[in-house]
Image (cartoon, grey):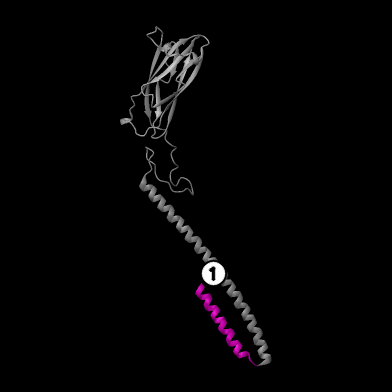
Amino acid sequence: MSSGELLGVEPLELKFPFELNKQISCSLLLSNKTDNYVAFKVKTTNPKKYCVRPNTGIVLPRSTCDVIVTMQAQKEAPPDMQCKDKFLLQSVKANDGATTKDITAEMFSKEAGNAVEECKLRVLYVSPPQPPSPVPEGSEEGSSPRGSVSENGNVNGADFTNAAKAFTERSDAQEKSAEAKALISRLTEEKNNVVQLNHKLRQELELLKQEGNRNRGGVSILFVIIVGLLGLIMGYIMKKT
């Protein structure tokens, strides 16, 4: 904070985390350590580029005031990220009980004999804050593949492609494994059903043999049919398994 006689200002440099197509704001803290009412006015060399709220005001004795400076969204980055824009903070002693409505342009005129204090502020572009570093691949069990991230925060395209390919292949393998398990389960169920049917037919065959021994007629043809059915069933079982 500067040790001005009327107003102190902090910081003395307006630092904007520069990003294209995005409005960016930073704040100034004005401190009045005197027992006087102090009027202030904020000017800039590029008024179309910046919005200052409030750009004029009154700071009460032994109090502070926050000023928000917003840079409009920029479509292009300046060469070498250097900014030549500047701000000027003017302050002057006001009458006791003065309000913002009492501020006039003549109050900040040195030609009128007013004791106007001035403080120049620079504008700096800084890099935006980096996102948290990702968890390294394989550090957590069951974690999904990640592309590597370089120091400047850019994702390595080759690593990301390889990781995505590996993840896709693993997903396909899991799907095929699930389909195989379902097919095996279905075939096993069908096999059990056929075995139960075979057992039931054998029981009926035994009953028919017993009746044939008693009746001694018409059993031979039926026996041949049943044996044929058993052969077809066993062939179906062998084909499925």
Residue 239: x, y in percent?
50, 75
Toward the viewer: 144 or 70? 70
Q: Residue at x 40, y 26 (%)?
A: 50
Residue type marked 1: Leu
Q: Which residue lies furthest to the right in this view?
A: 214
Residue 182: x, y in percent?
53, 64
Question: For numbered disc 1, what is the local secondary structure?
Answer: helix
Whether 235 is drawn above or below 33: the answer is below
Toward the viewer: 9 or 149? 9
Q: In this view, does 88 lie to the left or right of 203?
A: left
Whether 145 is drawn above or below 184: the answer is above
Q: In this view, does 5 lie to the left or right of 218?
A: left
Q: In which quarter of the image is the N terminus?
A: top left
User: Mark 1 — residue?
Assistant: 187
Q: Residue at x 54, y 81 (%)?
A: 231
Residue 33: x, y in percent?
48, 12
Residue 233: x, y in percent?
55, 78
Whether 166 is drawn above or below 235: the answer is above
Toward the viewer: 216 or 99? 99
Label 1 environment density (alpha carbons within 10 Å; few <14, some 14–19, many ≥20):
some
Q: Which residue lies furthest to the left in this view?
A: 79
Give the residues in magenta. 217-241
Q: Is residue 61 left or right of residue 152?
A: right
Q: In this view, does 26 lie to the left or right of 79?
A: right
